[in-house]
Amino acid sequence: MSADAVSVLSVARILPVLTVPSASMAVPLAEALAMGGALCAEVTFRTWAAEDVVKKMVGHGGIVVGAGTVVTAEQAERAVAAGARFVVSPGFDVGVVAVCRAAGIPVVPGIATATELMKALRAGTDTVKLFPAEPLGGIRMVRALAAPFPQARFVPTGSIGPEQAPAYLAHPSVVAVGGSWMATPRHMQRGEWAEVRRLTAEAVQRSAT
Ligand code: 3PG
């Protein structure tokens, strides 16, 4: 991962993970996140709208937009073409890493074991998504992996909420924490942009303390 994306994530500390049902939601969502103080967000490739959402959010500006749930090289190509500034994957895939490398786009592969982390480090990706963080043991898993791999930087994601985030963020190996709690598909479908803004602001403020 290139220094610029690491620095965005390490300054942002909070990475909203967005599964957006419709491209019509992209602009109000980007506005709510930016007004809440988010510096970046990950748009998951789990809905048909994902590429359009990336394009619209990038066009709108205000936050650095990446693509998430990128599990194939072909999806990575589409994410890059849509304008994603970084790519996140739930797992480690050499094809995804290769596409991002060739495009000069930072990639954050997912890892869940020491073996997967070793593969990621060998591929030169020392910033990894620890996924799914809470089922894997939460902050205890971060501590356990950080001990033998002090060079690794983690973006724990998966079943994390506002209660769990501060403990992760207090660990020196954690760059940022990802999660969907600030902007769920339910919030989006109901147009609850003020609530998205409030939850984002709360998360950002708590991450700074
Ligand atoms: C992801 O893809 O990163 C996760 O599904 C987001 O995690 P959460 O929905 O459990 O916060």
Image (cartoon, rainbow, N blue to C red):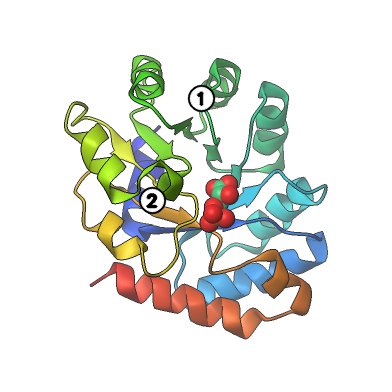
Q: Amino acid at mark 2?
A: Leu
- Residue indicated by mark 1: 92
Question: What residue appears at the point 35 percent right and 62 percent down from the top-left corner?
Answer: 165
The percent coordinates of residue 140 (x first, y second) are 26, 46
139 to the left or right of 36: left
Label 2, label 1: how many angstroms apart (C-alpha)? 19 Å
Q: Amino acid at mark 1?
A: Phe
The percent coordinates of residue 48 (x first, y second) are 83, 47
Quadrant location of residue 31?
bottom right
Residue 51's mark?
A: none
Please tell me whether residue 28 is drawn above or below residue 15 in the rendered image. Answer: below
Q: Is mark 1 within 8 Å of ligand 1?
A: no
Q: Is mark 2 within 8 Å of ligand 1?
A: no
The answer, for residue 65, to whether it is visible in the render is no
The percent coordinates of residue 3 (x first, y second) are 34, 37
SS of the residue at dot 1? Answer: loop
25 to the left or right of 174: right
